[in-house]
Amino acid sequence: MSSQTAVTSVPLLDLKAQYAGIREEVRAAVDRVMDSQYFILGPEVEGLESEVAAYCGCRFGIGVSSGTDALILALMALDVGPGDEVITAPFTFFATAGSIHRLGARPVFVDIEPDGFNIDPAKIAAAVTKKTKAVIPVHLFGQCAEMDPITEVARKHNLAVIEDAAQAIGSEYRGRRAGSFGTVGCFSFFPSKNLGGFGDGGMVTTNDERLAARMRMLRNHGAEPKYYHKLVGGNFRLDALQAAVLRIKLRHLDAWSAGRQRNAARYREMFARAGLGGRVVCPVELPGRRHIYNQFSIRSPRRDAIKAKLAERKVGHDIYYPVPLHLQECFAALGGRPGSQPESERAAAEVLALPIYPELTVEQQQYVADAVASAVP
Ligand SMILES: *Cc1c(COP(=O)(O)O)cnc(C)c1O
């Protein structure tokens, strides 16, 4: 008998386990902000901005209120608006295309390649029109899109590249980090991301000094100096409390991402040992990538049976994402039809995310693997 109590459930994410390891550090940092009574932007936010920019290999970082606002701010700074088209993938979180629509521009969907779940670079050129202003590749689940051919097609057609790196902080492609390839990189600090705050938060990164200044201005109602408005911006500001927490967490991020990678390798071994070969496909690590596993999404034609078994055994799981964006009700006017984005539709029907957070124990992972195996005997 093991000295540990038997596993009878596993959550999809356990932020309490993470907090237990950093509690004292975080409380000291939060205390520092409360003593300062400086709550919005200021030195903590500036500190986080330079630390995240350095971490991502970018010149500038600008703290914002969420990943969604990072996308909105990037599009605003690039003057995307009514009459413009922006190319992106339909298999992503809603905010990627929602942001385009909110600025009055039209999202144009280009299907994914099935191994990496990211936009298929070979299909982008055919979607470019005279109205295309930008392309938003998404680094889904923590693995970078194929940035070399994407950058190449964008350069050829004079398109801005906005990376949706919300799930991909620290992810690499050919030795460079997510957020450093495009015109602008957009990050989210939503609590379930690899670097998650104690609430909403986000960041844009760029190497373009002029664009950085413009985004910094737009983040705060376009004012420069205060009360002199050169542009109509918004309130996209980041709080000092979030920045203080995130600066502590950033110091642990590499260790946490390494823990996720270790757990991904362990699932592969467990599934192979269980002989799940053809029935459950583990995430594919594409060449030249550093996958940071914000999600570990398996795919299986028997997804719904596996999902039911996980629910029965109290294993946390989720489907990211069940409805591709071209088939969302709110985008009906764009004319998306079932069958028009076949790889995205197949992924939506087959994916299932399993617990992958770094604090998972071997026993917990074995419990998850056993549940998956028993669903597809
Ligand atoms: C989380 C996420 C966003 C939005 O970030 P929020 O901070 O929740 O606004 C955008 N795109 C992708 C791919 C995401 O995963």
Image (tube, rainbow, N blue to C red):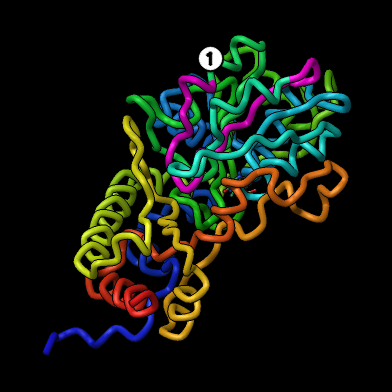
Q: On screen, 64 above or below 179?
A: below
Q: Does the magenta portion include 131?
A: yes
Q: Does the residue labelled 1 lie within 8 Å of ligand 1?
A: no
> Quadrant of residue 138 in the image?
top right
Q: On screen, 284 above or below 152?
A: below
Give the residue at x 53% y 14%: 152
Q: Does the magenta portion include 333?
A: no
Give the residue at x 37% y 74%: 376
Give the residue at x 70% y 25%: 127
Amino acid type at image mark 1: Glu
Nearer to the camera, 149 or 275: 275
Which residue position is annotated with label 1?
Answer: 152
Q: What element carries label 1?
A: helix
At label 1, counting other C-alpha atoms closer than 10 Å, the crowd grade (few under 14, some 14-19, many 20 or more) is few
> In the rendering, at what x and y percent does residue 362 appear?
22, 69
Give the residue at x 79% y 35%: 234
Q: On screen, 300 above or below 89?
A: below
> Quadrant of residue 226 in the image?
top right
Q: Please provide the residue range marked out in magenta.
A: 129-150
> In the rendering, at what x and y percent does residue 330 appear?
83, 52
Image quadrant occupied by the N terminus:
bottom left
> Quadrant of residue 335 in the image?
top right
> In the rendering, at what x and y percent does residue 164 appear?
58, 36
Q: On screen, 122 above or below 371?
A: above
Image quadrant occupied by the C terminus:
bottom left
